[in-house]
Amino acid sequence: MKLEPEEFVEERLARLESDVQHIQSDISDIKGHLLRVDGKIDALAKSTSEAHAALVQSISEVKLAISESRLALVKSTSDLKIWWLATLMAAIVGSIARALKWI
């Protein structure tokens, strides 16, 4: 095993210490960026949640409006069927009255 001179070891140690300081500085920068990104993600999650709640509310309102429209349509269709049946019955009664020479 070959021993290196002491000045080379100290030089390499100084370079390693410098590299470690740069790594620590980079890690500190990364932590700062992560904190800012974390805040942005929280804000985005909150706005997304609010938008989802608003969307669910509007979908519920649309469903209610469709249901009410459907009920109104069913009622008007029922009324139309009754009028159609009454008109048909009047036509039949009129035809019978003519056939029996009541009119």
Image (tube, helix red, strand yellow):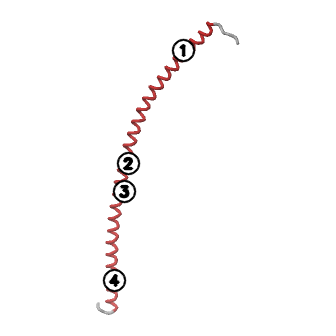
- Callout 4: SS: helix
The reply to whether callout 3 and callout 2 are in contact (CB within 8 Å) is no
User: Which of the two marks, 4 or 1, is nearer to us in this view?
Assistant: 1
User: Which of the two marks, 4 or 3, is nearer to us in this view?
Assistant: 3
Earlier-in-chain disc, 3 versus 2: 2
How far across and down, in percent of the image, does residue 102 sit? Answer: 29, 91
Q: For marks 3 and 2, give the CA distance.
A: 12 Å
Earlier-in-chain disc, 2 versus 1: 1
Please name the amino acid that badge 1 sits on. Answer: Ser
- Residue placed most toward the observer, 8 or 27: 8
Q: In the image, what residue occupies the spot 37% across and 50% down?
A: 56
How far across and down, in percent of the image, does residue 10 sit? Answer: 59, 9
Query: Local crowd at mark 4 within 10 Å, few (<14), some, or many (≥20)?
Result: few
Q: For marks 2 and 1, give the CA distance.
A: 55 Å
Q: For marks 3 and 1, give the CA distance.
A: 66 Å
User: Which of the two marks, 2 or 1, is nearer to us in this view?
Assistant: 1
* Residue with the mark numbered 1: 18
Please name the amino acid that badge 3 sits on. Answer: Lys
* Residue with the mark numbered 4: 91
Where is residue 85, by image quadrant? bottom left
Please name the amino acid that badge 2 sits on. Answer: Leu
